[in-house]
Image (tube, coloured by chain):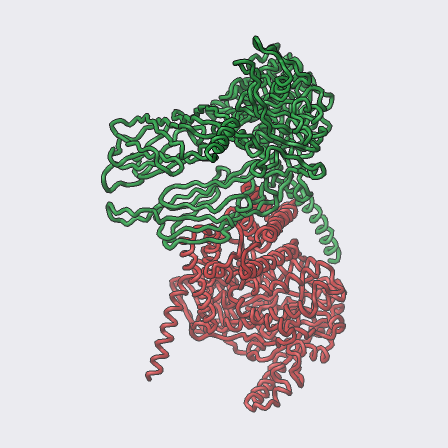
Chain colours: A red, B green
């Protein structure tokens, strides 16, 4: 078929995808047919594109162009394969019913050990987690909470650095006291071997519970955590894992610095926990994510605890147990509230560890050829692992336009009409399928932005793994930091360089567009591509300004009815707008009131199963609107427990918050949103860099 | 003594040299491929016509009468039409605004003529003012009416003892060459001589005529000499009888300066040949021979004549000789005779001139030299090449052009190169780099559908303009401008199948398909119902060879219609002699009872004609027919249809005239350049050489040939049925969807059962 026919045919198929995808979102009996039809047609367009690329567009005259051309093609093959696998994995995300412990007599329930590994987290973060764990609705005689302190090991306490040793001794002492206070067990070991996996495995030897819950030190569970997870363990003895989502109570650096849309836009991990894990669950391939999960001790014992060959011990352990024929369950209810890394540094460090760990699994375990895994489980693991190789493709996609525009390499051999007939339908179909699969959990261009932000750093980290697959070591992600003032991330340099290169490419492209009439068609396309890269890179600048964040805990939206009562007995009725462990904001129904400095907040706590009375100190009051901001006063352990139970103990609050921000937006909205928030940071960077230089010069003069 | 000897030699030479003058007149439009009005535009412009002169002709005098018109805006003193012949200026005509219509005669000196192609150039310099003339001004024009302008040439044949080298002089497109030829066989000779060798010889001679048609007539000579009555007082004696036998007595209208051909086995030809010549025949044999004149008193009984003898000991050897005549280069045969060794002669094979699909050819391999253009002007340089007539590619196949070209420094605005493939613009490039550029392997991917079976043409249209200074009246001469296209440039053809849609007289016109094709071994015949049509059949065979550019040895001539015909065949017949079976599956019948597909019987006809304002004879599919009793009278009809009398799929081309005598005249008109170029559709009727009466598509078309390999077959099938793959993909997706839903539901059920 000639290009005109190809254009008509492919855009007809795109229309079919569009119609089918729309039908698939409506609730009727044929929606699965429409969903699958749209997926298969979209994949057919992708396969057609890759075949066309391979068969007709790879010829070139010089060797360097040929190398560049093949690099681009390999990157496209990679993107195509991950896209196809992703479609397969997410073809039918599983929605499990809610199972609770109500149907089981307490005596028949298994014993549960809650293990909270800690390394260097602040004591107050650990305390909240331990207290919340103790509040879980479960027979008290069958629930044990343990703090696994790896920061106060014998090795740490006796290290040569005396200051550090003293700090470790002090930390161990304080945490032991804390454990005694909150009713938790304290476990430490002699040596810090095999990081978190070693810490947990040591604790497994010290405890006896049938089930093990692992919680990161900053992961605060809701009281109903065991209520919704343990029944899946009881109903199927082959289940080795019940994983739940990690609900992040604070925005990650991208959400905070760039979009400022933490409460309106799906979080980065919403796509993984909201869609992908459900897709994997359908294929019995959902995997352990290191925390917020229940594991069966007897199964863990068969693989000698958590695996430790890679730095992502969680996925590796799940892989080993899946290979033994055991099953996993994913309960899509946020019941653990954690902290995302606050700084870009910490964020990148976390992602580098994930990328390295997943690549280690690829190299060490070879999931495509793993014994014991079904073919769909293999695809499931491959999907999760291959994703982390994105830096290779992303860097190729960043640099290839420059290879053409600046160095004149022939990277793509096709006419404009062919690009319209083959490339564009593939791109559109890929976007349509992404929207169909992840539209509610990922806004347009957000993935690209995250990938660009991470690609340079994770690329280096991945190279390290490919050079030596056992080289990476576990690095704990720093969390719980507050940022006292805004500053430009030290990681900015590489992005300045990339922006300069892309700008140079754009200028060269414009010159080529004017002077080289022969290749104008292709130049237009590549120039467009380069400008797209430039917009993304400029957008990254917004993320690189680390914005000031002094509040220790992020306040999350709420809508509870509350009563504020003064010491004199006067009371005001209102509704909570947002709250955190530190305090809350309430809109009172009555305006122009005289409020005392100290009031008590009275409200129903679902997790505690009673009204709680929390003493508060007034921070701000606007009589015209009735808006009140106050801080909770932690007068006693009981009050502290009530605060935790009230603010962190109810999973419905997380659920409603998450549902509120999961909404699909159009590509145009996503694109304009990115554009709208992209360009101000450019000026801010300029201003802040000038200020920095001026300050440095001033300091030198002084 | 020396003077005497020289005089004797001159006398001897004169004795063997015949001097005969002839005057040829031709319209200049016959030497120009474009429109008959030649427009010369701009400050200076040139146009060149190629005027061929046959070898062996001496020009005595030549005159051109020019009919032209010039713009009234020109100034007489600086506006001149120069006429050049082979680059020598032979006339200068002022372009006078007061007398814009020009009728002028220019003599061409005889000394400037040379055998082969001569360049007749019209060059104008045109000004509307004495200074500051804008070269692109629209008032700078003049027109030469080539149709009304005539070339008159008086030539003389300088014939000595004829040798084979002279054949190219007798038969060529040049002035003074022979336009008709008579082929003679002997009665009772081997039938194969008639069947195979006659068309071979006709084709061989027509190929020398290149594009110019050759009218062939046929005679059969009696074996027995019958001596005519002599004038009074003259008696037949032995010497005279012998001279008569050796003369061209068997030709009814022997002309002194026309060559005829005697074809036959040596046994049959023995009575017509001198003993010496006869004894030399021991295999395939070709010879030029001059027969003496036979005079009786003051009158000439038989004129002196030149003949070409094509013979051999057997009919097969005669066929080999005819084939050799078709492939041989005359220049390599300075002798009068050519005897082939029997063993070697069987090796004569003919390969066609078309390029092979799937191969890459440099322009040099195709036979083109470097293209160089100089000066400020618009140039158009064609590159022609042949593809197999049944060249068939999928729609998405592409041709790769790798061009090596460059242009010099200081090109001005408006300079550009356009590339057209068979008239379709495929690429344009502005020549705008002030320092010039040279491109090597400048790669163009062109959709292969722009190419077609037969002759293809790539035009390099280059406009070269001098730079502009920006100052008034400060024009830069464009003499420095240069553009070069190297013949190291190459064309890479895609793989192609051998499929053609038939019947298609347009393809027949351009390529002689299906009579000329890659596989030349398939026998094809021209069937004549009457021996009087043999000349017409030979003329047609000759034309087919000209169209194909090579001899077509598989073409034979058969008398009468057999039950089974060759798969592809031509029938020349009168309506009465045409069997009904050729009309049963066809809406047209040329038999005594005619079935005519009148144009008005096509329901769409009127509307299409009205909307499209179609005034030419574009093929038009017509359904329905009217049966009637009528004669063809002066009209001839050519129809092409699926051959009902063939074993395999093929075409039969039926040409009918009312009488056998008319057939020769109509075939001569058909093969003329003007009418042949208008062949189209599958129904074609005419009664003069100017234009057809009707050209229509009557029957549904069908395809013959095969793709060659399965992958190509699949691609072509999809290409022919572009929506099939979409339907197939949709079906596969729908079926896959149902299967996938089923499997997913099964899995879902298995999962939920655990709950």
Task: Say which quarter of the image contains residue A321.
Answer: bottom right
Q: Position of residue B588 (x, y in %)?
A: 62, 18
Q: Is residue A137 visible?
A: no
- Looking at this view, is B196 or A494 the one in front? B196
Q: Quadrant of residue A71?
A: bottom right
User: Residue at 56% of width from left, 16% of height from top?
Assistant: B295
Describe residue A262's horizontal placement relative to residue B664 as left or right: left
Residue A610 to residue B751: above or below? below
- Camera-side residue of B560 and A591: B560
Res. B490 in view: yes
Query: Image quadrant of residue B568?
Result: top right
Q: Is residue B212 above or below residue B382?
A: above
Q: Residue B74 vs residue B34: left or right? A: left
Indicate left or right for B447 with B195 as reference. left
Q: Position of residue A109 (x, y in %)?
A: 74, 68
Which residue appears farthest toward the front when viewing the image?
B1
**In the rendered image, the vertical position of residue B481 relative to residue B313, given as above or below:** below
In the image, B696 versus A506, the foreground residue is B696
**Which quarter of the figure is the N terminus of chain A placed in?**
top right
Count all numbered tags in the image, as a single digit. Answer: 0
Seen as rendered, the residue at the extreme top is B232
Please determine whether, in this image, residue A485 is positioned above or below residue B47: below
Check the image and name the residue furthest to the left: B130
Question: Dividing the image into 4 quarters, which one contains the C terminus of chain A?
Answer: bottom left
Judging depth in this view, the residue of B116 and B206 nearest the camera is B116
In the rendered image, residue A410, in percent from the top left (x then y), is placed at: 51, 57
Q: Position of residue B658 (x, y in %)?
A: 60, 13
């Amino acid at each position: 078929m000639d290009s005109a026919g190809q254009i008509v045919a492919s855009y007809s198929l795109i229309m079919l995808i569009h119609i089918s995808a729309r039908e698939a979102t409506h609730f009727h009996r044929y929606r699965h047919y429409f969903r699958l039809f749209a997926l298969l047609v979209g994949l057919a367009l992708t396969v057609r594109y890759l075949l066309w690329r391979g068969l007709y567009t790879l010829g070139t005259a010089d060797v360097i162009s040929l190398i560049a051309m093949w690099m681009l093609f390999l990157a496209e093959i990679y993107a195509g394969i991950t896209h196809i696998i992703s479609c397969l994995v997410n073809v039918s995300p599983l929605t499990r019913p809610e199972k609770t412990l109500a149907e089981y007599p307490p005596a028949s329930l298994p014993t549960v050990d809650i293990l909270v590994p800690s390394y260097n987290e602040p004591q107050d973060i650990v305390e909240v987690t331990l207290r919340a764990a103790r509040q879980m609705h479960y027979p008290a005689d069958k629930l044990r909470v343990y703090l696994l302190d790896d920061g106060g090991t014998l090795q740490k306490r006796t290290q040569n650095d005396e200051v550090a040793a003293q700090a470790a001794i002090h930390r161990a002492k304080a945490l032991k006291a804390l454990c005694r206070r909150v009713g938790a067990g304290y476990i430490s070991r002699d040596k810090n071997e095999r990081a978190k996996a070693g810490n947990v495995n040591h604790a497994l030897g010290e405890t006896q519970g049938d089930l093990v819950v692992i919680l990161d030190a900053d992961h605060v569970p809701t009281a109903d955590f065991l209520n919704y997870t343990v029944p899946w363990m009881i109903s199927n003895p082959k289940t080795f894992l019940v994983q739940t989502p990690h609900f992040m109570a604070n925005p990650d650096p991208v959400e905070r610095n760039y979009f400022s849309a933490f409460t309106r836009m799906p979080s980065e991990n919403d796509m993984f926990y909201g869609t992908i894990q459900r897709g994997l669950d359908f294929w019995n391939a959902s995997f352990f994510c290191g925390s917020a999960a229940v594991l069966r001790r007897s199964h863990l014992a068969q693989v000698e605890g958590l695996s430790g060959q890679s730095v992502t011990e969680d996925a590796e352990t799940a892989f080993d147990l899946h290979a033994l024929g055991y099953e996993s369950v994913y309960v899509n209810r946020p019941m653990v509230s954690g902290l995302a890394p606050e700084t870009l540094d910490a964020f990148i460090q976390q992602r580098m560890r994930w990328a390295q760990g997943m690549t280690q699994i690829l190299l060490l375990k070879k999931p495509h050829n793993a014994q014991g895994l079904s073919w769909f489980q293999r695809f499931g693991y491959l999907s999760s692992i291959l994703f982390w190789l994105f830096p290779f493709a992303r860097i190729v996609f960043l640099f290839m336009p420059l290879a053409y525009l600046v160095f004149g390499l022939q990277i793509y051999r096709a006419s404009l009409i062919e690009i319209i007939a083959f490339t564009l339908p593939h791109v559109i179909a890929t976007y349509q399928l992404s929207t169909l699969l992840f539209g509610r959990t990922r806004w347009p261009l957000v993935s690209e932005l995250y990938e660009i932000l991470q690609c340079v750093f994770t690329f280096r980290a991945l190279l390290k793994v490919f050079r030596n697959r056992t080289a990476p070591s576990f690095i704990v992600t720093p969390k719980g930091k507050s940022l006292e003032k805004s500053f430009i991330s030290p990681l900015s340099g590489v992005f300045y360089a990339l922006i300069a290169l892309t700008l140079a490419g754009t200028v060269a492209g414009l010159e080529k567009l004017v002077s080289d009439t022969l290749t104008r068609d292709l130049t237009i396309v590549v120039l467009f591509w380069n400008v797209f890269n430039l917009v993304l890179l400029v957008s990254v600048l917004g993320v690189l300004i680390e914005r000031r964040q002094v509040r220790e805990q992020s306040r999350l939206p709420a809508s509870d009815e509350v009563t504020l009562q003064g010491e004199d007995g006067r009371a005001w009725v209102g509704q909570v707008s947002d709250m955190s462990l530190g305090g809350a904001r309430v809109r009172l129904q009555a305006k122009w009131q005289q409020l005392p400095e100290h009031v008590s907040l009275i409200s129903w706590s679902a997790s505690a199963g009673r009204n709680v009375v929390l003493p508060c100190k007034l921070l701000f009051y606007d009589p015209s609107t009735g808006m009140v901001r106050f801080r909770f006063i932690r007068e006693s352990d009981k009050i502290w427990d009530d605060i935790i139970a009230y603010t962190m103990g109810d999973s419905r609050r997380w659920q409603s918050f998450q549902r509120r921000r999961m909404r699909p937006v159009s590509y145009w909205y996503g694109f304009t949103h990115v554009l709208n928030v992209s360009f101000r940071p450019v000026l801010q960077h300029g201003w802040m860099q000038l200020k920095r230089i001026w300050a440095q010069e001033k300091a030198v003069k002084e | 003594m020396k003077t005497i000897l020289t005089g004797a030699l001159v006398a001897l030479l004169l004795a063997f040299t015949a001097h005969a003058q002839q005057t040829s007149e031709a319209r200049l439009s016959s030497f120009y491929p474009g429109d008959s009005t030649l427009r010369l535009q701009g400050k200076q412009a040139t146009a060149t016509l190629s005027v061929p002169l046959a070898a062996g002709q001496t020009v005595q005098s030549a005159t051109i009468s020019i009919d032209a018109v010039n713009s009234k805006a020109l100034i007489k003193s600086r506006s001149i039409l120069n006429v050049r012949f082979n680059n020598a200026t032979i006339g200068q005509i002022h372009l006078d605004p007061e007398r814009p219509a020009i009728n002028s005669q220019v003599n061409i000196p005889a000394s400037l003529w040379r055998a082969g192609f001569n360049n007749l150039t019209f060059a104008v310099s045109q000004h509307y003012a004495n200074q500051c003339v804008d070269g692109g001004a629209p008032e700078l024009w003049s027109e030469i009416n080539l149709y009304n302008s005539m070339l008159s040439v008086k030539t003389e044949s300088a014939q000595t003892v004829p040798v084979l080298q002279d054949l190219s002089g007798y038969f060529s497109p040049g002035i003074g060459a022979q336009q008709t030829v008579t082929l003679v066989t002997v009665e009772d000779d081997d039938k194969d001589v008639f069947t195979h060798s006659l068309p071979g010889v006709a084709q061989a001679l027509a190929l020398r005529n290149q594009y110019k048609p050759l009218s062939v007539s046929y005679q059969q000579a009696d074996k027995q000499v019958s001596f005519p009555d002599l004038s009074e007082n003259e008696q037949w004696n032995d010497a005279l009888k012998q001279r008569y036998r050796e003369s061209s007595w068997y030709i009814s209208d022997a002309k002194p300066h026309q060559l005829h051909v005697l074809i036959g086995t040596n046994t049959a030809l023995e009575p017509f040949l001198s003993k010496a010549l006869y004894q030399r025949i021991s295999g395939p044999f070709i010879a030029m021979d001059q027969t003496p004149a036979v005079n009786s008193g003051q009158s000439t009984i038989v004129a002196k004549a030149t003949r070409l003898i094509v013979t051999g000991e057997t009919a097969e050897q005669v066929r080999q000789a005819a084939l050799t005549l078709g492939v041989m280069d005359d220049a390599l045969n300075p002798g009068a005779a050519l005897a082939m060794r029997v063993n070697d002669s069987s090796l004569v094979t003919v390969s066609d001139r078309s390029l092979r699909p799937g191969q890459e050819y440099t322009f040099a391999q195709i036979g083109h030299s470097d293209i160089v253009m100089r000066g400020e002007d618009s140039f158009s340089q064609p590159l022609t090449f042949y593809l197999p007539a049944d060249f068939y590619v999928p729609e998405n196949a592409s041709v790769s052009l790798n061009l090596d070209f460059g242009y010099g420094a200081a090109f001005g605005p408006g300079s550009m190169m356009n590339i057209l493939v068979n008239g379709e613009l495929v690429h344009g490039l502005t020549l705008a780099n002030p320092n010039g550029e040279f491109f090597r392997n400048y790669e163009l991917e062109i959709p292969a559908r722009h190419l077609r079976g037969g002759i293809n043409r790539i035009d390099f249209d280059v406009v070269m303009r001098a730079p502009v200074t920006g100052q008034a009246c400060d024009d830069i001469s464009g003499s420095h401008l240069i553009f070069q296209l190297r013949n190291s440039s190459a064309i890479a053809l895609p793989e192609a199948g051998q499929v053609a849609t038939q019947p298609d007289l347009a393809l027949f016109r351009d390529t002689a398909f299906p009579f000329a094709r890659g596989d030349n071994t398939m026998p094809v015949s021209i069937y004549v119902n009457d021996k009087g049509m043999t000349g017409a059949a030979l003329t047609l065979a000759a034309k087919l060879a000209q169209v194909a550019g090579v001899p077509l040895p598989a073409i034979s001539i058969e008398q009468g219609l057999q039950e089974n015909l060759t798969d592809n065949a031509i029938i020349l017949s009168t309506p009465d002699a045409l069997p009904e079976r050729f009309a049963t599956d066809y809406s047209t019948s040329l038999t005594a009872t005619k079935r005519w597909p009148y144009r008005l019987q096509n329901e769409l006809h009127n509307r299409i004609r009205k909307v499209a304002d179609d005034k030419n004879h574009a093929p038009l599919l017509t359904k329905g027919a009217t049966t009637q009793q009528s004669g063809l009278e002066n009209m001839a009809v050519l129809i092409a249809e699926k051959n009902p009398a063939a074993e395999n799929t093929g075409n039969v081309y039926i040409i009918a005239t009312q009488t056998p005598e008319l057939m020769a005249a109509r075939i001569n008109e058909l093969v003329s350049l003007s009418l042949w170029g208008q062949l189209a559709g599958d129904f074609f009727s005419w009664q003069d050489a100017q234009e057809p009466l009707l050209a229509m598509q009557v029957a549904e078309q069908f395809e013959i040939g095969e793709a060659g390999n399965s992958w190509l077959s699949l691609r072509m099938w999809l290409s022919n049925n572009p929506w099939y793959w979409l339907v197939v993909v949709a079906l596969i997706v729908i079926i896959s969807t149902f299967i996938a839903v089923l499997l997913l539901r099964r899995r879902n059920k298995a999962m939920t059962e655990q709950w």
